[in-house]
Structure formats: structure tokens, C-alpha cells
């Protein structure tokens, strides 16, 4: 996590603690969501905003199938059998609203130690912080920071409540269990020109720093804008344009992406939203390729092949669909889409198609529950000649209040990925432990 993320967390945590001195207003219905505008589920569980909660935890974990960045003598990825460890952690989550401001926060951090193998000892950190400020009656500013440290594919990113599918700087689909630092900062300005017409302008900057020298880092930026027209209180149509630039500090090349989309959002009553959009992206990628030399040239230079730069220019479809259904004490979400990503340190600029389903329950006086499942496929959109990467994941977790502030927590996660004949493996994680949390509601860690 960069120093700005840490400073922002400290500042807003102070606001959260002091928050009871302010009046908290109920979140109004703002109409159906627009997929091209920045959004987050930070500070929410079960489809509702949470009061701020703090917690500490200690859990025992069993991991199976962790993958270091190395190959065995047969050319297959190395995997590690059962590892037994202990994790200690701390977290905070919640949302608070004032007359002109709203702050939403999810933070979770832990430290992990295994025995007898210590290779994967380390820390996991995740911060999702959003601030909305109404500059005037018709203008709203949104600042959003996502950042952290991810050491395992079953780290915090497996089950944090991420709503965005366009988080360029969040490593959601890594091949290896290797330490990665990441950060993405976003600023958006929304202008409500009339009761029906609105405009949004924004930008992002991101950095992904992988500590293994065998993996490629990435960084870049994006500028975007959209226009939305609400022709009824619950239906909105919109068009958007974005420009993205990806760079790879440990590899030669870059990518420029121009993307145009149009979409429709509809509120299905006060408890459900459906949004869909689609369009096209022009992906221009500069990279290195290997070419065969003519026999006469090969005889002179003493080699049959040469490496040279080449530009690939393609047009590909993009789109996304999302359905959210909120119940009295729970929420169900379904997401799917096709987009362009900076890759995962092995795959560089890539087209990614994926789908996921998630359900969370925060009700009663004792129990919270969350489950999620998903699938994704990544293929190269640049000059790489590399097989597709298929990833499957599923997981579920619960907390149960034993007494007062003491909670039991348990979770199981499964992940499987396939990359041609190189890798075809499963990872499993089981965790069980105790947590101490504040607040009157049951502890909603996930």
C-alpha cells in the first residue's frame, strides 16, 4: 500500500471514530447505477450501509496447492502440499453520511506464519476508501482509493466486496502466490445538468509492483467521460468514452486502448437494479516478436531467428451486465463482462471475459454469511503467443456471535486454474478462528 493510502486510512478512521458527534442521514435512492461510473461496495453488507465496525482476529489456516514462481524438472509449475499456519489481523468497515459528504471504508490487514515451510510467511493488506463530496446542488466530486499488498491468490482479494469490474490496478487473477503491491487512485466529477441529464468526467492512475523479478510489473492511467439521460425515474441510458494507457517497466512495449460504449440501467423497484452496456475497443499494442531470418542472413549472423518490435492493432467487443437484488437483510449480485486488462505479470495486455455471483447476509443478532463464485478466461490481446488462462473460484464464510463482542469465524475457498499443459491445478484454503468486534450488529468481516 502506498504512503498516500495509509495516510488516507488514518485520516478517515479518525473521522469514523468521531462520527457519532455528527448526524447520520439515511441513504436516498439515487436511481439505477451506471456501469461506467466509479462505484464501490465499501462499507456495505447485505445490501445495506454499515455503521463503522472495528475488529481484531486470530485464525488457524490450512493451505493446499500454493504456487511459487518456479518450475519443476518436468517443466510443470511447482506446488506445495498442506501448509499449516496462524494469522492475526485487524479490520475496519462502515459508511457514514453528512449533509454534503459520505465516507465508505473497508480495510483488512493480517500477518501470517506457516510451519514448517516459511516461504509464504508475510502480510496481506487491503484498503477500499471512497469519499463523496457535494460541491453544489448539481455537482458532486468522488475520490476513490484502492490499494494494498497481496501475497496469496487466496488473500484479501478473494472475498472483499469489490463492485467494480474496471479496477485496472487490482491483481484479481494472479497465476502465482507471490507478493504484489498495488494501488489505484480515481477522481470523478459528476454534473447534474438537469433533472434528467448528467455528465461525468474522471481519471485513474494505477501501479502494480510484483516483487518476483520473473514477473512483469504494470502501471498506467485512464481518462473517461460519459453522458447519461434519465427518461424515467428508474431508467437511464448513457454513452461513454475512455482512453487507457498501459506500460510494463520490466518488459518492452505499451498499449493504448480507445473504448466506446453505450448502456441502459433500470431500477426494478427499490430493491433491484439491472444494468447492461456494450461497445468496442481499439487496442494498439507495441511488443516484441521473434521472426525467422532468411537462410543467407542466418548464415552470416550465426542464428536462425531475430527479435524485433511490432505493433498490433485490433478491434474487439467489450461489455458488461450486472444484476443486484437487495432483500431485507441480504443481497444477491450477478456480474459478467468482457474487457481489456493490463494482465497478471505473465499475460500482458489481455482480453478478459468473466462472470461471478455473490450473496451476503447480515441479519438477526448473531449470524453473518457470504458466498461467491466466479469464472474468468484471459487471452493475449497483444503480440504474445500464449495459451488461454482459465480460472475458477468459489468460497463461503460466516461469523457467529458467541457472546457480547466475541465471534467465531470460519471460511473455505477453492480455486482452480488451467493454462494448457503447463498448469492444471487446484488450491484450497480452510480457516477457523475467533474475532473481537465492536458494534451492535453481528460482525460482518466479509
Image (tube, rainbow, N blue to C red):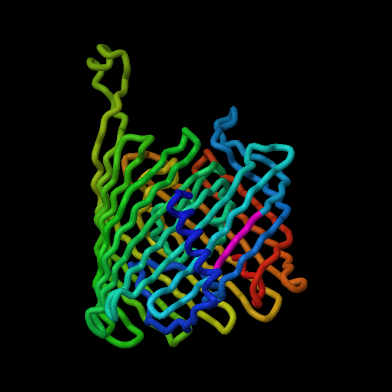
Query: Residue at 73% of width from left, 65% of height from top?
Result: 408
Measured from the top left, where is residue 313 in percent x and y? Answer: 23, 47
**In this orientation, which residue lies closer to the viewer: 382 or 23?**
23
Foreground of the two, 184 or 51: 51
**Residue 247 falls within the magenta-colored stretch:** no
The chief SS type of the magenta part is: strand
**Res. 445 image quadrant:** bottom right
Q: Nearer the viewer, residue 50 or 45?
A: 50
Residue 356 visible within the image:
no
Q: Is residue 347 left or right of residue 80?
A: left
How far across and how far down the image is residue 75, in percent? 55, 31
Horizontal and vertical percent for residue 362? Answer: 62, 76
Q: State the residue at coordinates (33%, 56%).
A: 204
* Residue 182 in view: yes
Is 414 above or below relative to 13?
above
Residue at image coords 41%, 43%: 347
Q: Nearer the viewer, residue 227 or 204?
A: 204
Q: How many marks?
A: 0
- The answer to which quarter of the image holds residue 90 is bottom right
Magenta residues (range): 89-93
Residue 444 relative to residue 353: left or right: right
Looking at the image, which residue is at 38% across and 77% down? 100
Quick one: quadrant of the C terminus?
bottom right
Amino acid at each position: 500500500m502506498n504512503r498516500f493510502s495509509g495516510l488516507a486510512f488514518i485520516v478517515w478512521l479518525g473521522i469514523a471514530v468521531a462520527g457519532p458527534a455528527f448526524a447520520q442521514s439515511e441513504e436516498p435512492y439515487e436511481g439505477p447505477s451506471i456501469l461506467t461510473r466509479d462505484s464501490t461496495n465499501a462499507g456495505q453488507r447485505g445490501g445495506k450501509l454499515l455503521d463503522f465496525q472495528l475488529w481484531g482476529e486470530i485464525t488457524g489456516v490450512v493451505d493446499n496447492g500454493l504456487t511459487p514462481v518456479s518450475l519443476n524438472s518436468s517443466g510443470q509449475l511447482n506446488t506445495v502440499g498442506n501448509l499449516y499456519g496462524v494469522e492475526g489481523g485487524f479490520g475496519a468497515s462502515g459508511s457514514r453520511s453528512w449533509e454534503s459528504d459520505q465516507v465508505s471504508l473497508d480495510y483488512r490487514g493480517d500477518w501470517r506464519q506457516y510451519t514448517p515451510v516459511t516461504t509464504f510467511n508475510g502480510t496481506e493488506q487491503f484498503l477500499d476508501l471512497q469519499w463523496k463530496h457535494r460541491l453544489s446542488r448539481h455537482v458532486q466530486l468522488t475520490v476513490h482509493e484502492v490499494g494494498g499488498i497481496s501475497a496469496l491468490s487466496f488473500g484479501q482479494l478473494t472475498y472483499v466486496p469489490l463492485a467494480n469490474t474496471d479496477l485496472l490496478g487490482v491483481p484479481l487473477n494472479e497465476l502465482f502466490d507471490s507478493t504484489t503491491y498495488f494501488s489505484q487512485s480515481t477522481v470523478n466529477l459528476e454534473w447534474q445538468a438537469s433533472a434528467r441529464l448528467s455528465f461525468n468526467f474522471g481519471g485513474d492512475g494505477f501501479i502494480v509492483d510484483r516483487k518476483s523479478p520473473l514477473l512483469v510489473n504494470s502501471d498506467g492511467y485512464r481518462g473517461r467521460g460519459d453522458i447519461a439521460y434519465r427518461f424515467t425515474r428508474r431508467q437511464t441510458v448513457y454513452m461513454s468514452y475512455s482512453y487507457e494507457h498501459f506500460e510494463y517497466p520490466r518488459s518492452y512495449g505499451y498499449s493504448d486502448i480507445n473504448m466506446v460504449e453505450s448502456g441502459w440501467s433500470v431500477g426494478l423497484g427499490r430493491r433491484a437494479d439491472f444494468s447492461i452496456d456494450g461497445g468496442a475497443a481499439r487496442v494498439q499494442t507495441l511488443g516484441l516478436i521473434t521472426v525467422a531470418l532468411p537462410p543467407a542472413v542466418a548464415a552470416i549472423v550465426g542464428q536462425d531467428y531475430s527479435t524485433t518490435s511490432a505493433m498490433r492493432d485490433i478491434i474487439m467487443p467489450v461489455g458488461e451486465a450486472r444484476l443486484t437484488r437487495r432483500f431485507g437483510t441480504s443481497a444477491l449480485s450477478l456480474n459478467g463482462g468482457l474487457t481489456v486488462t493490463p494482465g497478471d505479470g505473465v499475460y500482458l495486455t489481455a482480453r478478459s471475459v468473466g462472470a461471478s455471483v455473490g450473496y451476503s447476509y447480515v441479519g438477526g443478532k448473531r449470524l453473518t454469511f457470504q458466498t461467491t463464485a466466479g469464472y474468468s478466461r484471459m487471452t493475449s490481446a497483444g503480440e504474445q503467443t500464449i495459451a488461454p488462462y482459465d480460472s475458477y473460484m468459489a468460497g463461503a464464510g460466516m461469523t457467529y456471535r458467541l457472546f457480547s463482542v466475541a465471534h467465531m469465524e470460519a471460511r473455505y475457498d477453492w480455486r482452480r486454474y488451467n493454462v494448457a499443459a503447463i498448469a492444471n491445478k487446484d488450491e484450497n484454503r480452510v480457516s477457523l478462528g475467533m474475532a473481537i468486534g465492536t458494534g451492535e450488529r453481528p460482525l460482518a468481516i466479509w
